[in-house]
């Protein structure tokens, strides 16, 4: 059960339905992975079944340059490949309105949307797909232009569905829009939020595995996970920072900012003794480019004042250590947002981690994050194919989204989700 209002409860007959998807899967004009598109197809089919006419939208990439405040429109970030994929997969016909940007501020003239919507109403096309939402002036704005854009989009539709779980940021298309249309969650959004409940109310023990290239964006979720989890495994720069802070060693490449945050984190972690499970073996290298010179270092050998070179992976030996295997095999729930090694050169730590997790056949395994899931598919294609059909696994379509909800302390914590909830409370 979920508190979110679902569009299946709404009357869609003859209505224009504006649907925010997270089809942010295009890079340089090519689709990287169709998982996020495929995951939204049930919502699309049910819109048709209920007699609605869909106007779809998504963001792609990050065309908005925060420093200059300008929007860079490039064909490589167009929604066209997504439209083509949907047309071929579902045998439907779509249309992209030809909105032209007026300059570096992005698209301000929305009038080309009208003829496209008329074609949809007349049955000449099956769906409209708006240009990349981040090409429009106001999508990421903090001022009134976000409302102005949302209201203009809303003028083409009768109701709004948010099925963009991965798009956790509060933007015009995910947040402001709910002020102007009756708003509902899509089927993917509901499924993802239900699975987030498994992180917040887990079968215990809950083991979380988190890695990252930087501390700053991970601090909020990391402290929340420390409280929520029974055991926590760290990788990447998060583990390097933790080791440097705890054992007072110097690790090459670790920035002073990361070290400072790691020290803060260590103070919090010390309130929960034994929660952090230290990976006993790490890989040290003299350079970040050459894998051949990697050697194993033992964490138990670390002594205050030692100088370490680059630490670029968790050694796979860590995951065959009996005490580590015991932690994994006794977990009832395993949450993973982690690529362990310095990508793309160091794959062995991640491979060993995912293989060990796979061997925990009875545990509920929750994977969050585009990179995490992509690595899984690339490194262990056979296991990944099995995992996709195994009810003990769940793959979230958004990693930032999962971490944001965790940091907010609720499956309903993300701002766009809050906006859907407040809608029914009114
Ligand atoms: C993602 O791919 O992480 C989501 O689509 C969110 O994109 P964003 O981080 O650019 O908001
Ligand atoms: Mg992201």
Image (cartoon, helix red, strand yellow):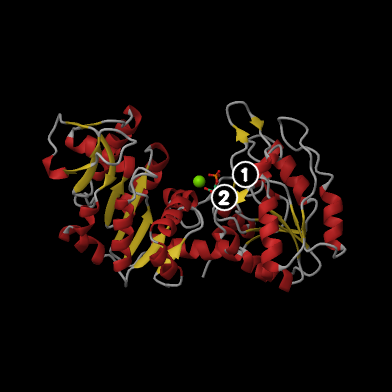
Q: Residue at x 62, y 44 (%)?
A: 171
Residue 170 horizontal/vertical position (percent): 59, 45
Per the image, the residue denoted by label 1 is: 171
Q: Which residue is mark 2?
A: 167
Residue occupying the point 50% across, 61% down: 193
Q: Is residue 288 visible?
A: yes
Say what secondary structure mark 1 lies in. loop
Query: In front: 183, or 32?
Result: 32
Which percent across, then down, holds residue 409? Answer: 42, 52
The answer for how far apart the CA atoms under marks 2 and 1 are is 9 Å
In the rendered image of this protein, does residue 317 appear above or below residue 268?
A: below
In percent of width and height, residue 367 lies at 41, 59
Asked whether the beta carbons under mark 2 and mark 1 sit within 8 Å of each other, the answer is: yes
Q: Quadrant of residue 362?
A: bottom left
- Local crowd size for mark 2, using a 10 Å CA cut-off: few (<14), some (14–19), many (≥20): many
Report if the beta carbon of the residue with label 1 is closer than 8 angstroms to ligand 1.
Answer: no
Q: Nearer the viewer, mark 2 or mark 1?
A: 2
Decide if residue 4 is in sight here.
no
**Which residue is found at the position 22% from the left and 45% from the top?**
282
User: Is the CB–ligand 1 distance for label 2 below 8 Å?
Assistant: yes
Asked if residue 145 is positioned above or below residue 209 in the image, the reply reads above
- Residue at the spot x=14%, y=38% of the render? 302
Q: Which mark is residue 296?
A: none
- Tell me the quadrant of the picture where the C terminus can be found: bottom right
Report the front residue among 387 and 328: 387
Q: In the displayed structure, does residue 222 sit left or right of residue 76?
A: left
Vertical placement of residue 365 versus 309, above or below? below
Residue 172, image quadrant: top right
Q: Residue furthest top?
A: 68
In the image, taking residue 412 as reference, residue 312 lies left or right, namely left
């Amino acid at each position: 059960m979920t508190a979110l209002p679902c569009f299946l409860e709404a009357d869609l007959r003859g209505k224009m339905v504006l649907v925010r998807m997270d089809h942010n899967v295009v890079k340089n004009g090519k689709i990287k992975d169709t998982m996020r598109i495929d995951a939204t197809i049930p919502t699309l089919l049910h819109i048709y079944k209920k007699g609605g006419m869909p106007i779809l939208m998504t963001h792609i990439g990050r065309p908005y340059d925060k420093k200059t405040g300008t929007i860079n429109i490039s064909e490589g970030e167009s929604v066209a490949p997504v439209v083509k994929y949907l047309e071929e997969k579902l045998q439907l016909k779509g249309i992209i309105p030809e909105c032209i940007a007026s300059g570096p501020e992005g698209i301000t003239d929305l009038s080309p949307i009208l003829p496209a919507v008329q074609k949809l109403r007349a049955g000449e096309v099956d769906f409209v797909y708006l240009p990349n939402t981040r090409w429009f002036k106001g999508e990421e704005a903090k001022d009134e232009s976000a409302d102005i854009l949302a209201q203009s989009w809303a003028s083409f539709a009768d109701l709004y569905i948010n099925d963009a779980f991965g798009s956790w940021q509060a933007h015009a298309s995910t947040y402001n829009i709910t002020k102007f249309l009756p708003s509902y969650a899509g089927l993917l959004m509901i499924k993802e939020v239900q699975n987030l409940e498994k992180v917040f109310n887990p079968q215990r023990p809950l083991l979380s595995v988190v890695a990252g290239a930087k501390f700053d964006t991970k601090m909020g979720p990391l402290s929340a996970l420390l409280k929520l989890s029974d055991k926590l495994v760290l990788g990447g720069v998060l583990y390097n920072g933790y080791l440097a802070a705890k054992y007072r060693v110097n690790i090459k490449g670790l920035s002073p900012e990361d070290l400072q945050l790691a020290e803060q984190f260590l103070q919090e972690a010390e309130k929960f003794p034994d929660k952090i499970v230290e990976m006993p073996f790490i890989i040290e290298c003299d350079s970040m480019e050459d894998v051949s010179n990697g050697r194993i270092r033992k964490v138990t050998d670390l002594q205050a004042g030692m100088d370490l070179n680059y630490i670029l992976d968790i050694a796979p030996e860590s995951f065959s250590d009996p005490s580590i295997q015991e932690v994994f095999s006794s977990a009832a729930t395993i949450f993973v947002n982690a690529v362990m090694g310095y990508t793309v050169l160091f794959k062995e730590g991640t491979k060993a981690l995912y293989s060990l997790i796979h061997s925990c056949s009875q545990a509920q395994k929750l994977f969050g994050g585009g990179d995490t899931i992509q690595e899984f598919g690339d490194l262990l294609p056979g296991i990944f194919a099995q995992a996709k059909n195994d009810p003990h696994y769940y793959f979230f379509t958004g990693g930032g989204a999962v971490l944001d909800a965790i940091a907010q302390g609720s499956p309903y914590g993300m701002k766009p989700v809050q906006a859907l909830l407040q809608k029914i409370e009114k």
